[in-house]
Structure formats: structure tokens, C-alpha cells
Amino acid sequence: MPINNYKIKIPWEILILLLILVSNALFLHYNTFRCFNFFDMGGFLDASWRVFRGQKPYVDFIYTTGLVRLYMNAFSFSFLGLVNWRS
């Protein structure tokens, strides 16, 4: 008669997975509030809005990082229909 070892392994695998997830959540929580400044997103959103409205980075306005975020955000503006914003 074969012995079913899966009943013993499943609780340990779930415990290990939960330990990894909780450790990851604590690590990310610590590093997020230590390194990132969530109140300094205005420049990024302004640059994305400018790209959405047709301006070119590095030509029409100064931007010091890569372009992928700008174009992804500009695409999300057009995809979500945020065309009628007034400033």
C-alpha cells in the first residue's frame, strides 16, 4: 500500500509560501517608505501629460530620465479617455 506523503508536504509548503510573502511585504514596506517620496510625482505626471498633448521630451521640455514611463503614462491617458481635463 503506497504512502501518501502529500498530506504532510502541503501544510509546510503553504507555511513556507506565507513566510516568504510576509517577509517580502515587510521588506518592501520598509524600503518603500525609506526611499520613495510619494509626494514628488508631479514632475512625472506633468511630463507624461506633455507627451500626451504632443510635446517631445528633451526638445520641448527638460526631462532627465528614460522615456518608457512617459509614453506608457501617455498611452494610459489616451486609453482611459482623459482627454477632457482642463488645467
Image (cartoon, helix red, strand yellow):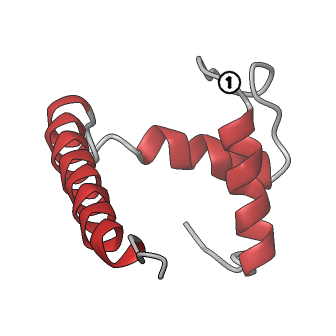
Using the image as rendered, state which of residue 33 and residue 57 is in the foreground.
Answer: 33
The residue under the point 41% across, 73% down is 6
* Residue 26 place in picture, x, y as percent: 15, 48
Residue 23 to residue 63: above or below: below
Quarter of the view holding residue 84: bottom right
**Depth check: 25 or 20 in front?**
20
Q: Residue at x 73, y 50 (%)?
A: 72
Q: Position of residue 30 (x, y in %)?
A: 14, 39
Name the spot of residue 81 as percent of width and height, x first: 75, 80
Count of numbered labels shown in the rendering:
1
Foreground residue among 68 and 3: 3
Q: Amino acid at mark 1?
A: Gly
What residue is shown at x 40% (from left), y 45% (from top)? 41
Please name the residue that numbered disc 1 is placed on.
Answer: 66
Secondary structure under tag 1 reads loop
Residue 8 lies left or right of residue 80; in this view the side is left
In the depicted structure, whether residue 63 falls above or below residue 53: above
Side of 84 where 20 appears, left or right: left
Q: Residue furthest front?
A: 1
Residue at 27%, 46% in the rendered image: 24
Quadrant (top left/top right/bottom left/bottom right) for the C terminus: bottom right
Query: How far across and down, in percent of the image, does residue 29 sit?
Result: 18, 47
